[in-house]
Amino acid sequence: MSPDAEPLVLSRLQGPLGEMLAVTGRDGALRALEFADHAPRLHRLLALHNRRAGRAVRPSDGPAPPALADTLARYFAGELTALDTLGVRTWGTPFQERVWAALRTIPAGHTVSYLGLATRVGHPSAVRAVAMANAANPVGIVVPCHRVIATGGALGGYAGGTERKRWLLAHEGVSLAR
């Protein structure tokens, strides 16, 4: 069975920002992570990315891999680099995958502007495309799209909500003006 044909598991995890939904493959790699109150977004992104991968799969309910649950718990307990080693597998376009890989290079406690992120991926004039790729990130928190802010320092958007973005950045030690 090819990795793209493997069954997926949907798990529920508790965190300080509310219940989260995690989708993992048999290999334990994280495919999607979203807040439970944004479940429609999770399912929409999964459907889109699964089509792109040439398959139609609905995750079955099951427990989260212990390593995933432990890593998220360590991150929320203050071990901010815990997420850096978590395996992630996504099915974006080549451009989205480059943006998502660049997001993982932003250290906890730091932010980058959309223009800065566009420059990191070699397309400084593609700020809007980078913002769209950022918004299509199926693995929030772990692929830290919350670390991208507007050029003037404003928070900008966040699929999980602005208050969650503010909390995540404060948790990581980023000082933001209100």
Image: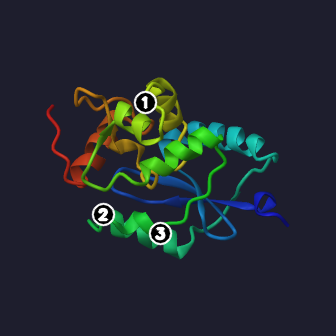
Compared to 49, does 155 lie above or below? above
Q: Residue 154, percent across and down?
A: 25, 28
Q: What residue does disc 2 label?
A: 80
Instruction: Decide if residue 71 is on the left or right side of residue 55.
Output: left
Q: Amino acid at mark 2?
A: Leu
Give neighbour class at mark 2: few <14, some 14-19, many 20+ (Cα, 10 Å): some
Say the numbered circle drawn on residue 69: 3
Pick whichever of labels 1 and 3 is earlier in the sequence: 3
The color scheme shown is rainbow
Q: What residue does disc 1 label?
A: 124
Instruction: Decide if residue 173 is on the left or right side of residue 129.
Output: left
Compared to 152, does 49 lie above or below? below
Residue in the foreground of this view, choosing between 101 and 51: 101
Pick whichever of labels 2 and 1 is earlier in the sequence: 2
Q: Amino acid at mark 3?
A: Ala
Residue in the foreground of this view, choosing between 3 and 62: 3
Choose mark 2 or mark 1, whichever is in front: 1
Quadrant of the drawing holding the C terminus: top left
Q: Residue 21, percent across and down?
A: 54, 53
Say the numbered circle drawn on residue 65: none
Q: Assign a secondary structure to mark 2.
A: loop
Q: Assign a secondary structure to mark 3.
A: helix
Q: Residue 127, percent across and down?
A: 44, 27
Choose mark 3 or mark 2, whichever is in front: 2
Residue, x 28% and y 44% (percent of image)?
A: 111
Question: Visible in this render: residue 35?
Answer: no
Quadrant of the drawing holding the N terminus: bottom right
